[in-house]
Image (cartoon, grey):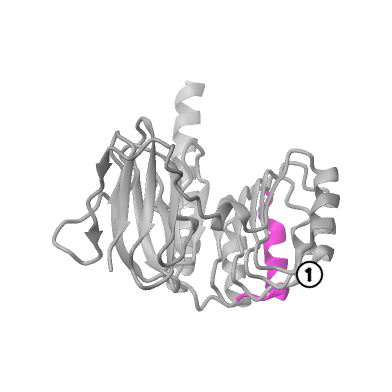
Amino acid sequence: MKKILFSVLLIALVPTVLSGEKSLIESIEKIGGLILPWPGETNSWEVEFHLRGRELTDDGLANVASLKSVIALNLRDTQITSAGLIHLKALSKLKRLHLERTKIDDSGINHLAGLQNLEYLNLYGTKITDKALDQLKDLKNLKQLYVWQTEVTDAGVEELEKSLPNLKVVRGIDLSKIVIVKKTETKPQENLKWLPEGGPEKPPSKSKTGSFTIITFQNKSNKNTQLYWIDYGGSKKLYGEIAKGQERKQNTYSDAVWLITDDKEKPLGYFVAGTKEALAIIPK
């Protein structure tokens, strides 16, 4: 009898919770947010504004903070400032935060100091300096930090790494490094097919796991390009830049989908990895 009563009570409560979350989700979607369930965790969310919500301002972040159980938040290229980061204090479960190419500076980083679950932070292309790094020293779970094209120095990074020995700080070398293929290296065994954006043949909407392989991307176009991996959820993740006339060797798995854009993130086309080491030529 008690079990039946508990089940009835649970059923009565669930619509109330979902109704409240539904209202919040709708308010976030109205200002351009894309909300996806976070894999493996009930009522937890990934929120993205970098695709269709780039006009997001500080006021709009208040809606996101009300959702509470946000695990990943992508604010890349939005209009937020340091003042708006105060709204993120409430996101205690946050693990991944993208702030690249926003208007934030050192004054906003203190609002992130209490996010003890944060594992990934991208500050690429912002106005931060070594002062911002000082405010991250207590984030003991932080594993990845991107600070390329900022004002941080080698000395500042070294000090932060002393406090967080498990932290990997990327200042641009890993993401923009061009790997020249030596004549003694194994040559690619096949050429990947170029799938132009808007063409008749569409790439898969997301990557799948497969066997390890390597792709050598060669940029034969007359423009600088960016390389994105389309992840297992269908989101794009920046991996690097390939200047015109240059090439990049990239570790990958078979069935991975790779997007090529111009330097303004306009999609140009796709490659889909096979099982063999391959050459991917970005055409003129």
Is residue 85 covered in magenta?
A: yes
Residue 257 can be seen, yes or no: yes
Mark 1: amino acid? Asp
Label 1 residue SS: helix
**Residue 36 position in % (x across, y down):** 43, 52
- The front one of 241 and 62 is 241
Report the residue at 43% width, 60% height from top: 246
**Residue 140 position in % (x across, y down):** 77, 42
Q: Would you call the spot at circle 1 few (<14 residues within 10 Å), some (14-19), or many (20 or more)? A: some
Is residue 114 placed above or below 49 in the rendered structure? Answer: above
Is residue 5 covered in magenta?
A: no
**Which secondary structure dominates the residues rendered in magenta?**
helix
Quadrant, the C terminus: bottom left
Is residue 124 placed above or below 11 in the rendered structure? Answer: below
Quarter of the image for residue 198 reads: bottom left
Q: Which residue is mark 1?
A: 106
Is residue 195 placed above or below 31 in the rendered structure? Answer: above
Q: Is residue 52 left or right of residue 65?
A: left
Give the extent of the magenta segment.
80-92
**Residue 99 position in % (x across, y down):** 61, 64
Residue 135 can be seen, yes or no: no
Report the residue at 50% width, 40% height from top: 42
**Residue 56 position in % (x across, y down):** 53, 75
